[in-house]
Image: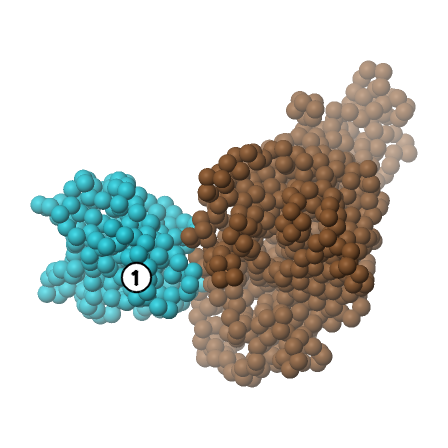
Chain colours: A cyan, B brown
Amino acid sequence: MKPAPFAYARPADWPAALALLGSGARPVAGGQSIGPMLNLRMAQPGLVADLRHLPEFGGIAVQGGTCRIGAGTTHAAIEDGAVPGRLGAILAGVARRIAYRPVRNRGTIGGSLAHADPAADWVAVLPAFPGHAVALGPAGERRIPLAGFVTGIFETALRPEEVLRAIELPLLPPETRWGHWKFCRKPGEFSKATACLLAIPGQAPRAVLAALDGPPLPIPDATALLAAPEAEADRLLATLPGLEPWRAALARTALRRAAGMAAAGMPTA
Amino acid sequence: MSPEAIGEGVGASLRRKEDARFLLGRGRYVGDIRAAGMLEVAFLRSPVAHARLLGVQKAEGAESRVFTAADLAGVGTIRAPSALPGFRVSEQPVLATGKLRHVGEPIAACLAPSRAAAEDLAAACILDYEALPVVADMLTARAPGAPLVHEHWPDNAFLETFRDEDLSELDSIAAAKVTRRLRTARQCMVPMEGRGVLAEWDPRLEQLIVTTSTQQPHVIRTGLSEVLGLDEGQIRVVAPDVGGGFGYKGILSPEEVVCCHLAMRLGRPVRWIEDRLEHLSANANCREHHYTVTAWADAGGRLLGVDVDATVDSGAYSLYPFSACLESAQVGSIFPGPYTLPRFRCRTVSACTNKPPILPYRGVARTGVCYALETTLDALARQLGITPAAIRLANLVPPEAMPYRNLVGKVFDSGDYPQALRRALAAIDHDRIAARRAAGECIGFGLAVFCEQGAHGTSVYHGWGIPFVPGYEQATARFTPDGVLEIRTGLQSHGQGMETTFAQVAHEVLGLPTARVRVVHGDTALTPYSTGTWGSRAAVMGGGAVAEACRLLGERALAIGASLLQAEPGAVELSGGAVRRRDGGAAVTLEEIARTWYRRPQNLPRGVDTGGLEVTGGYRPDPDTGTHSYACHAVTLRIDTETGEVVLEDYLIVEDGGVLLNPMIVDGQVLGGLAQGIGTALYEEMPFDEAGQPLAGTLADYLIPGTAELPEVRIDHMETPSPWTRFGQKGLGESGAIGPPAAIVNAINDALAPFGAEVLDLPASPARVLAALEAARAR
């Protein structure tokens, strides 16, 4: 369990980082997913670009009604309240259930999203938000709706020459309702089913079902799920044949419980 | 007794002497030890479960640093026979020859200055093999036409045992009869520290120095001598700090043999450190049992007979020294449990499969046996409409029958088994359970009662005929010139706290403070022979041996002390670390006596014992058939019937380990075992596919419970002395790992009873609980 030889680069600025990616470097942020993959030799990149020292890699900026979360912001920072208001409370509730604190101290929201493991926490909840992933490429920044960012298992809408620069989310009114439920038996285990439901006043509620055998399933209008969780969960599961029966049972439960929490107006969780 | 009265001796919850180094990170494990010029080894391992090995193309340009079986001239195979009739012994090559018999079997050793570079070499080798059909399941291993793991055997079985008895009439006289088919999962033991070995050849002494993570330094020395063709004097085995054993380090491993051979051949230190991937996917597993149990009872729940058909998946090889039969043959001898079973039929098979070989894990077969028997008892109770407590109380060996010899000849030394059960019942809030159940919660309550034979010795093991038979345990006690007491033991302490408990025993006998006692262990050059630390034997055997060595040393000191006091030996006594006149007059300390022997010999009396202040004492209980500690585990849990998740709410253990040398350390043993037992019950499973591929490669897939998954635990001690041991102590190091699967699944099945559902296979994962509910719905 030692990695195959690789070269290591630490770009000092974003143009240098993009140049490295252009030459085929594998980007690394907190290293909590890529680290074990390197050790198991499941990933054998020739060159690794360590993004952690880039200016403004992490950090939160609020402008107008939008919160821009630097891709390198750690789960721990979000858990500890770096994001303001109702949005921050919701994200903190997600962050604190990611693995163990040592993992959260290093792991980043952008690294996790770009890695696109179907069972990962941010992959499972961010598609519910009416926000964008900000991709930085040679031609500058481009915004990708979060609901369409993760396209497959370990696959995203990022182009090879792009890096995930930030995540932009709208600040949320205090009355926003939220439900989030995932099934894993111990911290650090991969989730076997995750669902969330976000109801912003004045907008159609949005939901996501994730930790499936494929990419997350965004539900752009979850009005029916919020109103009749049982029937709608059953209907949605019927569209997902091929899941093992117990995984399907968990997915159904995840949808019902996330919707139930949102309906009950649970403040964070 | 009050803590003051106990002081530092037997029964004191003394803080562990070794904790300072462990808590401050000063422990030293094989992985911390580097030798000048050392080479690291990575093993090229079999990617398939069964194949004919046609050739290995060594990494190009590095052929001199890659070694295959063909390069190991003079190295034998590892053989772990048993004298049990019909046992077939395997020849385990240290590097594969001819055939590959399980995924992960070592094929070539690749050496480099760093492990990463060694792994690069392993990755650059090319294997040529021809895949063969795989024996992946123990139950079909002996089917007609099954491929053979060892081709010169008639079928895939190491051993079959029978205990026959005609039970056919029971159907007509029993009030209840149940049959259950039950399965326990294949597990990995997952000690915090994996295996590791550093081998060095000392050309001056012409001696191999093997620093290895083992529970049995002396047995490893014997095994290495046999396989390498060296005499035992040419081998010194050192076990430094060892980060958990649990049975996983009671083995002579192929990796140890290969490292030793290469260190001798190359004249350079050679080290291998097992990583987690190797542990999970390549090396020895444990626990995989299948049972078909039929039990009959009368209307009062009194057992009339039990019929057992047990299969153990022993994997591809018989491991040294415990062999491939210990587990399955033990099933036949311990299945009657703590009960007065009148009739018993049992057939066992140790199946040989294309999986890693198994080792006895904490609890050995007892965990599976307890699971099979106790869940069957609950099924009987449900059928009879009586409580789980009632059926047990109808069958437990009563205290007035002690010592009790059961129908297979096991002798229980002492105890009040029914009282353990009653104390557990009394500590549970049954009304609250009933109220919550009435309110619609899915709540269950479960029990398990079992006993644990520990420290069984010569009279038990000579019949197994495995590579060693434990005899008299020895310890050496000696004073240094300044009066520090050194205790030398061939046992190895890897979490048992022996550096503390043996100091307490020495204090009990000689009275000197435990701070003045040092326990030396884990080095064949410094300690008397011992078969090592296994089988819950150290407290009984080591405790007895240390006490005897100290007693003999005390007699020598007494004679010198009497002379210094100018008194007759009969007029003095040893107490409080000094020799004193019985009339309350003068005293001379053990320090002074030690100084006299070593540095002021002119003051010694004529006729002094010239053996001086160093003496080896030996000990074996009589009878040596083993102590029987026992326990009742009681658990309350709730089930989320939508997810299948089981949440343990209350866990109570009533335990009788006889006289406890150090109750705090005993609690630690019980809690650590409990965590492993909960793992067996709910989490741990190494699945294999039909091709014999292990499917969990990391601890994200192979789940072990962490602190957050453990319930609050209450431990209630009974202390019925064993009549056979030095202080009345009993072995109980494995106890905590035995009861949980039975108690927890009984509680799960209690909770699921209203649904008509029942879990039969371990672990009781959410998927299995949901499947049981689904199956009940479908009926």
Quadrant in the rendering for residue B393: top right
Mark 1, residues whose alpha carbon is within 10 Å: few (<14), some, or many (≥20)?
few
Residue denoted by label 1: A235
Quadrant in the picture for the N terminus of chain A: bottom left
- Residue drawn at x 35%, y 47% is A97
- Indicate left or right for A246 with B26 as reference: left
Residue closest to the eye, B601 or B14: B14
Q: Secondary structure at mark 1?
A: helix
Pinpoint residue B211: horizontal percent, then vertical percent: 61, 56
Q: Amino acid at mark 1?
A: Arg
Quadrant in the rendering for residue B419: top right
Which chain letter matches label 1?
A: A
Q: Is residue B261 visible?
A: no
Pinpoint residue B424: horizontal percent, then vertical percent: 63, 36
| B261 up-or-down from B524: above or below | below
Residue closest to the eye, B137 or B692: B137
- Residue drawn at x 65%, y 71% is B352
- Residue drawn at x 66%, y 69% is B351
Residue closest to the eye, B234 or B345: B345
Pinpoint residue A221: horizontal percent, then vertical percent: 19, 57
| A46 up-or-down from B666: above or below | below
Residue closest to the eye, A111 or B331: B331
Pinpoint residue B98: horizontal percent, then vertical percent: 61, 81
